[in-house]
Every structure is written in C-alpha cells, then in structure tokens.
Amino acid sequence: MAGYQKTLYILVVSVFITVFVMTTNNNFNAILKPAINRVSRRSADRFLLSNKDAPIKGEGEILRSSENDSLLPFSQSEEWHRHVNGCRTVKIGDTAHETFPAHKNSSVAPSSNTKYFVDKLLTSRRHAKDVYGHRTVINNPLRSFSVVEPGGPNGCVERRRSTVVKTSRARGCHAAVNAGFFGSESGACMGNVVTDGKRIQDGGGIKNANFGIRKDGTIVVGYLSEMDVLREDNPFVQLVTGVIWLVRNGTVYVNESKAQDCAGLQEYGPMDKFVDVLSARVAVGHDVEGRVVLVQIDGNTEERGLSLWEFAEFLLSLGVVNAINLDGGGSVTFVLDGTVANYPADHCTGNRSWHCAREVSTILCAHDLDDVTSSCRVVNTHTCLKVTILCVILRWILQ
C-alpha cells in the first residue's frame, strides 16, 4: 500500500476511535482499551527487541549491571531440562499445595496499590532491624496480574534476558518485579512458566514451590506434579516457579520446604546457606481476601537484607496467607510505571559509585484489567462487532 493511502487509513481510524470513545466511554474502558493495549504491546515488542536497553548513562559512558551480588540464580554450566541430581520429580499424583479463591470484585479501584515501607523486624535474637522495600496488593488478579516473559513474547524460547523496566514498559505494568530463576549465562527460564493463558514451558515435575492462578480464578501455591501443570480442564493462566515455600496457611513453612525443594534452581550454595544468608528478596503470595501480594526487600548479599526465615515472618506481619520465594540478590528490581523504584544491589560496570538493575528473566506485572474471557460477555453485540472490526483494522495497519 502506498504511503499516502496508509496515512489516510490511519486518519480515518483515528476519527473512528474518537467517535467510538465519545459514544461508548464505559465500554471503551471494559474492552477497547485492553484490545488496543495488546496491539500496542506487540508493536512495542518489535521495537524493543530490535533495540538494546537504554541503561543508566554517566560521564559519557553506558553503565550496566556488573552482576557482582553473589546470590546468583542458577549454575551457568547446567540446564533446567535435565533431571537435577538428588531432586525428586513428580509426574502424576497428589502433591502438597494450597488453593484459594482469587479476589473478584471488579468494582474495586484501582486495580493495584503499591506502598513503600520502612519497617522494623524483631529478629530471633530479639534485635530490631530495619526492613525497607515495596508491597503491591493486586485486586481481581485473574484480570490484572500476569507473569511476563523477559522482553515480551518468546523471551523464554529465545533465552533472552531483559531488565524489568524494559519488560514492564512493553506490557504496560503499573508495578512490576523480577520473578523466576534463570540460567545466569544461558539465559534459560527455569521451572514452570505460564503467561496470560499460554503455557511456555513446564518444569518436568521437579519439586519446587509454585505460584499460579487457574482459569476459574483459583490461586494455587505449593508443589505441583507435571500433570497438575498440564491439566486442560481448568488450566493455569499464570504460573511461576520459585525456591522455598515461605508461608503456608498463615504459618512459616521454611523448615519443611527446604527439606523438599530442589536446590538445583539456585547456585549460591547448599540449601541451608541459601535460606540463612542476608540478601535482597522477592515474594509472591496472597492475602485472606484472595488478592495477590508482591513484596520486595532491598539488601546486599551477606551484608544486609533478610534471611528467608526473617522474610517469612515479615510476610506474616503483612497479612500474607501463602507465599513463595522468588529470585533474589542482585536480580531484585522493583519498577513503578516504567521507572526503577528500589535500590538494586549490583554495581554498574565502569562506575562502581552507581548501582544498576540486572537483566533478568520473567517478571510479575500488575496492570489494568484485562478481559481474559470473552469481550462480548461484558458489552452488547453491536459494540462488540464495532470493536472486532476496529481491532482487525489496527492489526493490519501495524503490520
């Protein structure tokens, strides 16, 4: 198509959008905005994947994470898709996990709420220590919470690593945090990954703690067999794997979990060392109302931060019912509306007076409500037809 013809079509569609929004404003918020966002994300992904991150700049040089924080995610010489020595695999049968109905009140606004905290935690030695980080509470998580591949679609297949900033901007996240473990050199995503209803990979039944949401809105936390993950009658729409089930039914579950979790997903050292070391931490869980809760703690491995025992106790003080531990240390990055909001542990290459966010794997994203079922269920047939036509035109123009 000639350039002037395409420009004309874009102008016509722009006028159509304006008229549509003015006449059906409520329906726009319910269906058109998510539809346009999905198209925009695909367009943004194509741009972002062809351009490297624009990291922090200082004194004429480009600064990137030196990955010096020693709590690294996974052995660079090994791959996930092998049977980890000494780790139990469960192909079929009952495994220990908890289920809980997700929050579903769509009238609650906003879809998520984030708070920065500076708090005191009483340690086992009765010493008070400062704890600082972010907590995000996500309402209606079936429609406003996503696991996102690094850099966008196909990130795990292509073994990409990306900063949380880059991935979250492409997905339109209000709040985002790093999530799953990954190959520190290969870039491979580790464990189970399901994003927006698409199963990216399964962990082959390796026993590690998981957090997910099924199609019917059931939150699932804990250990899953391979058949649990592959289940088709009520499939997972979001799923991520961590190491250590921190809180189970409102009690600390670290001791029981470290005896069961596969230690091969992290490379810091023996499981006891991984659990006991002070470090920056990330957890995902839910509260008694079924809202998803993201918690990020700043720290520096072996110097400051929390052990997993302390982290579990702190989560209980926040009202978390079930939660798992995700990738920590230098990977920990919390992003608000496209901007890094925490204090990453890694120094920058070329300038150690700066700290830089690490390129990581999957992220967890709090976003505007998506209609994960059918658009025509929430608007009338005439409106749905108009939206369908509009989306087809937009996709054709952006190709």
Image (cartoon, helix red, strand yellow):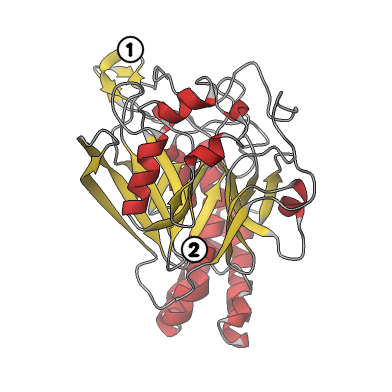
Q: CA distance from mark 2 to mark 1?
A: 41 Å
Q: Nearer the viewer, residue 96 or 108?
A: 96
* Residue 9 is at least partly visible in this image: yes
Q: Is residue 138 above or below residue 294?
A: below
| Left or right: 399, with 231 as reference point | left
Q: Which residue does the image show at 40% across and 17% down from the upper left?
A: 66
Q: Position of residue 55 (x, y in %)?
A: 37, 28
Q: Residues within 10 Å of mark 2 (few under 14, many from 20)?
A: many
The residue sitting at the front extreme is 125
Left or right of residue 372, residue 14 in this image: left
Residue that badge 1 annotates: 350
Q: Amino acid at mark 2?
A: Pro
- First in sequence, mark 2 or 1: give its number: 2
The residue that mark 2 highlights is 141
Residue 186 lies, in percent from the top left, at 62, 22
Hey, which quadrant is residue 68 in on the image?
A: top left
Q: Circles 2 and 1: CB distance less than 8 Å?
A: no
